[in-house]
Amino acid sequence: MAKSKPIIIGVTGGSGSGKTSVSRSIYNNFPNHSIMMLEQDSYYKDQSHLAFEERLKTNYDHPFAFDTDLLIEHLSKLLSYQTIEKPVYDYVNHTRSQEVIIQEPKEVIILEGILILEDERLRDLMDIKLYVDTDDDIRIIRRIKRDMDERGRTLDSVIEQYLSVVKPMYHMFIEPTKRYADVIVPEGGENAVAIDLINTKVEKVLTEHLREGAK
């Protein structure tokens, strides 16, 4: 009989919410399974046709920043057990790199990103949709620490970007997608009880999926 398709677990939430920690907790809980992570951040649009000064104006927290058509195309290929060439984004030059990452198909795909529930076509591909819900003050503290430690940014620049772009885009585009989630996870990766419940649910779905595929 025909082999069942892979399952897709969507994990979303605002910047600094802990969605990456949740995604990695799920990933690390199933080391013996065929599982992969796919980040929406890899699918920022190619901007090589724009002058560098224009690229600097990009609002990376807006739906228009993403090449959602390409992401859907790649997910469709993975669901058909086809290999994809995942794009690599160059944050220094603010455009897509010439490099790609060869990604083999897996039985479980964890799709992680701030706006994965914003597009109905993406939502329809997901078997489980998770929204990581964390207070604004915690998220900005995490973002300040990350951007200053890892990206060499100043405190003033991080705060200015957060107040002018990140926070308004969150409330305009990201937070409203909470209503599409199957499970809302308060406080992200710090919520051990929620992570355990999610892993139990994923294990059940995965077991049923593998059983169907064996018929």
Image (cartoon, grey):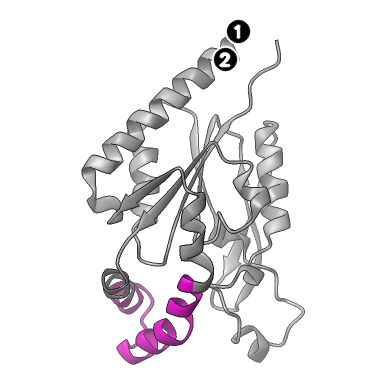
Residue under circle 2? 212
Q: Nearer the viewer, residue 38 or 170?
A: 170
Give the CA distance from mark 1 to mark 2: 5 Å
**What span is colored magenta in the figure?**
144-171
Q: Secondary structure at mark 2?
A: helix
Q: Is residue 30 above or below residue 36?
A: above
Q: Residue at x 46, y 72 (%)?
A: 171
Question: Label 2 amino acid?
Answer: Glu
Q: Which mark is residue 215?
A: 1
**Residue at the extreme right:** 49
Residue 160: image location, x then y, percent: 40, 89
76 drawn magenta: no
Residue 187: image location, x then y, percent: 27, 56
State whether the magenta stretch is mostly helix, strand or loop: helix
Q: Residue at x 47, y 79 (%)?
A: 168
- Residue 207, by quadrant, is top left
Q: Which mark is residue 95?
A: none
Left of 203 or right of it: where is 83? right
- Residue 60, by quadrant, is bottom right
Task: Look at the numbered discs 1 and 2 and tell me whether their residues touch, using CB distance below 8 Å.
Answer: yes
Residue 28: image location, x then y, percent: 34, 38
Q: Quadrant of the N terminus?
A: top right
